[in-house]
Amino acid sequence: MERQVRRSDDDPRTAEQPDAIPILSVAELEADPHGVFRHYRPRMPFVAHEAGGFLVLRSRNVEQLMRDPRARATETAYPEMRGIHDGALFDLFEHGMLTANGTVHRRRRSPFTRTFAARLIEDLRPRIRATAEALVGSWMDEGEVDLVEHYTALIPARTIAGLLGLPQADIPHFTRLAYEVSRVLSFAFGPEDIPDLQAAAGELKDYVARLIEERRRAPGDDFLSRYRAEAEEASDLSPLEIIAQIVQLIIGGTDTTRVAGAMQVALLLQHREQWEAVCRDPALIPRAVTEALRFEPSAASSARLTQEDIALDGHVLPAGAVIILSTMSAMRDEQVYARPDVFDIHRTDHPRLHPVFGGGAHRCIGEALARAELEEGLAVLARHLPQLRLTGAMPKLQGHSGIRRIDRMCVTSGTPRMLRATLDAGWPQTMRLDK
């Protein structure tokens, strides 16, 4: 299928561009997103999506539109395009910071900026490291373990629970709901899935509302207590806005990092010489995290809504269109990265700001926390389990937009019980990842 999109006359390559933009199906995008993006990226700046809107493919265009005032956050345009016009799911878009613009966005985001400042997140590293150490210690002698369920999902879940003052016993409940609700950020759901997504969003909303009410009755020394008190004292956020920000924080603080944590380990184990290099030299860990986030990102895109016609490389994005800024495609752009389809932790062509965390006013507020969790989680595995190996097939991330998905990732520690004390005693203190 093809969709007619006007061409712009202000680009010298206009004569080389076709008039029609292909409309890609969910099936072909889900089957091989990298292959699809690789095919179309040199040919056209964007493609149409069968569910509506356009996928922007090229790095320079994605970076431009992240900051372009003509492309604003979607507010409620995205759920409405997908047939969601009310309910708890709709409330997340209507009242959340991620989809807001201007002063509304700043008002909803500002209570979080101090807590998630990079300097304060650095102080969390010892706690994150201790969590990772305890998790590894609980299963390192077992023959086989699902690294997602028993490690990479629990590090961010326990960290966000600690930050918000959530009971550790609640982790299975709120993470299950977060993983379900996050599906709405992808195109891989149909009308038949919306009732289940609405139910999960409603449960998560009710869970957060109960927590906030508990903090009102009995405040504690935690972020949630301070956030509730400050927001209500300032009277600049409605009750629904207060709930929506915490719901979005739980989703963003658990799902993306569990996926990224597993995939970075899988990629290193697949490229054994790079895994061994990281085990020998922990100074390579931040570079390994950066490259894994580029090569197989857990968050594939950001969405915007065009306010007017926008010319891109000879074509025109029409006003009023939902555009999916595909950072997943942009981070394999041949115009930016040498050998983009090669995983290489030694590459030197990463941009100063990692595209996976977005750009402009909506750049991810949790970037420093995500990096701390990913780096410390990888460091503990490299320290204790240099013989770690995949026991099944290489896991494959699913999804071409929004938050991507991962299933089981089975590994074996390859570490005889008798070597534990030797490994623990033999790791030089000077090789720690502390900043």
Image (cartoon, rainbow, N blue to C red):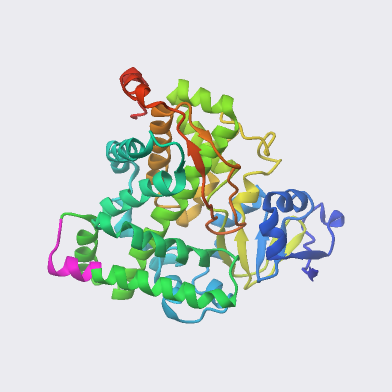
Q: Quadrant of residue 323?
A: bottom right
- Secondary structure of the magenta portion, mostly? helix
Q: Quadrant of residue 384?
A: top left
Q: Residue furthest left?
A: 218
Q: Residue furthest bottom?
A: 86
> Which quarter of the rendered picture does the N terminus lie within?
bottom right
Please tell me which residue lies in front, 22 or 256: 256
The answer to whether any part of residue 73 appears in the image is: no
Is 94 drawn above or below residue 412 in the view shown?
A: below
Is 335 drawn above or below residue 84 in the view shown?
A: above
Q: Residue furthest right?
A: 15
Magenta stretch containing residue 115, yes or no?
A: no
> Which quarter of the rendered picture does the C terminus lie within?
top left
Q: Residue visible at 46% across and 66% down? A: 181
Is 123 drawn above or below residue 324 in the view shown?
A: above
- Judged left or right of residue 96, residue 55 is right
Q: Residue visible at 36% across and 72% down? A: 203
The answer to whether any part of residue 278 appears in the image is: yes
Q: Residue visible at 48% across and 72% down? A: 197
Please tell me which residue lies in front, 158 or 285: 158
Residue 251 on image: x %, y %? 41, 60
Is 184 drawn above or below residue 16 in the view shown?
A: below
Please tell me which residue lies in front, 103 or 275: 275
Residue 418 on image: x %, y %? 35, 22
Residue 229 on image: x %, y %? 19, 65
> Which residues are drawn in magenta?
211-220
